[in-house]
Amino acid sequence: MGTIMARVRTFGSKRYWLCPAMTVLPLALVGPQAIAAESLFDASLKSAVYGYQLKTAEQSNKTDDLVWELAPTINWQRQSAAMKTRINWRHETLFYKDAQPDKRSFNEFDFNNQISFFRERLIWSLDASQAYQIRDSRLGIFSDKITGAENLSKTNRYGSGLLFRNLRSAKYRTELDLSYRNYDSAAAEVDDGLLSYRTEAYDGRWLFGTNDRGLNFFWQYNGNIQRAERSTDNNVSGLLHGLVVGVPFAPKFSVIGRAGSERLDNGREYDNSFDYFGAGVEFRFGARSRINVTMNRSDSEAFGQRKETDTYAASQFLIAPTRRTSLEGSFDRRYFGRTWDLQGKYDLRFLSMRLRISDNVRTQNQFDRELEDLGIFVCPVGSTDLSGCFKPPTDKYMPVFGETLLQVRGPNSELREELVEQRNLSLTVAYSKNRLNASITLSDTELRYVESGDFSTNQGAALQLSWKLTEHSQLLANVNYYDIDYRNENRKDENLSASVSYQQQLTKRSDLRFTIRRLDRNSSIAEFDNSENRVWMEYTYKF
């Protein structure tokens, strides 16, 4: 058995240490149950011909060209009682008729491995990926390999995580989540002002306490410690933790007290601390619903100087009237102001809704690749649209081998190494009945770059449709709209992408798809206006 070595850098010195324990120990604990497994190997070859017409404010005439794409793909999955492994590799070669350079090649891969022990109390994960991504939406939020490859950054990510949690039925909750992530982003061909950079992020989260808030005495202590080591700027370190205790004084009522603190420091102009304590009342109702309200006192500091003392109200709640409906969150305060943290879901037979509101501070590239399991559609692993997806028949449905819950990327369209305050709101509504699958997502994101002073807002809408015409054919539609306001530049961009596809299954191993797409950017500064018309046909053969 090979030994995998993980490099860990200590926070207090510049020395590097090799720490094999995090990876070797889990491998040693894997028993015979990891041997019996299901495996799935897919190999396919896609050939596509694109025709596009591009118009920019800088050119008086439209630019058009033909592109031939050849893309082999390999997908391998393996799953056993204790181990899940997925590897996806894709190579794309583009041949241009007139454009220079006349040939481009791209390699992308995605690897994920997860090993569980002790009835999934302990989970060790390892992942790595390579992709090409826009780092500055000012260059074109819809830039892709066909017409915007010069705007893309080759980005490599890898990391490892170790999660321990006891059984949900246990009297006491114990959760510990440790992770390491490395982000390596190369400079794009077009200067986006970011150059090449590398970020190493360390993160630790914990939660300890009683599981039943109706006990004679209950308590919970949770926290998060993080550190980001940046190649182009100072390191960032942060600590957030809090304690809640409660004592019932009447049926369904408890007196609660809480206290906590937060620290975040980038070694320069962003050195903040926030301490609070408070007390209030909690009311429990239904099978697991609760709501509490507390009055709190806080002291905040910046660079060691007291900044503000405040008295404020806060609330935490979980409202779950049925197993299909829940709303959980908090209304609180942190050193940068009032915060909301909210997650809601509503499920009917044909209709589902998901609501998410969050506030957070970290380097912006850590927001990237944050995928959310919405639990609305179950799709084949690797799906990028609703093709082949279906709505789970019950809320307890668990995807089988080769299936996954629909993963949705957040509206983050930037990939900087800079520290950012992000406020995000998203609402997704999905409908599935007979031959129609539909999903619409509305989002509102606010980004405040605390080191450069940049500020932007992004209001977006995304629509996905899949309509099965016959057993072997379907119609697909995708519409994305982003209204981005770059406040510091007095610039507003309205970005629209709309496409319609017809897909026909020719044989059990081959598919044909025909797509037309329109891109449009309407900017308040005329020199940034552009548009594109594109049509293409792709043939995919599965070996």
Image (cartoon, helix red, strand yellow):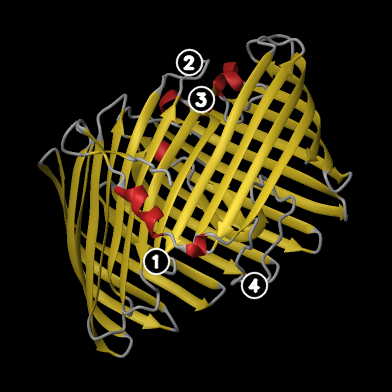
Task: Describe the element under mark 1 as helix, strand or loop.
Answer: loop
Q: Nearer the viewer, residue 376 or 504?
A: 504
Task: Describe the element under mark 4 as helix, strand or loop.
Answer: loop
- The mark lying in front, picked from 2 and 1, is 1
Q: Mark 2 and mark 1: span between their CA atoms?
A: 47 Å
**Extreme bottom residue here?**
251
Task: Describe the element under mark 2 as helix, strand or loop.
Answer: loop
The residue under label 1 is 121
Q: Nearer the viewer, residue 282 or 396?
A: 396
The residue under label 4 is 394
Q: Amino acid at mark 2?
A: Asp
Q: Amino acid at mark 1?
A: Arg
The quarter of the image holding the C terminus is top right
Q: Mark 3 and mark 4: span between their CA atoms?
A: 41 Å
Position of 258 compared to 370: left or right? Answer: left
Q: Amino acid at mark 3?
A: Ser
The part of the image, by quadrant, that contains residue 2 is top left
Please report whichever mark, 1 or 4, sits nearer to the chain's N-terminal start.
1
Q: Residue at x 57, y 30 (%)?
A: 141
Please report whichever mark, 2 or 1, sits nearer to the chain's N-terminal start.
1
The part of the image, by quadrant, that contains residue 395 is bottom right
Q: Is residue 204 above or below residue 196?
A: below
Please report whichever mark, 3 or 2, sits nearer to the chain's N-terminal start.
3
Q: Amino acid at mark 4?
A: Thr
The residue under label 3 is 153
Question: Do residues under tags 2 and 1 come within 8 Å of each other at their CB atoms?
Answer: no
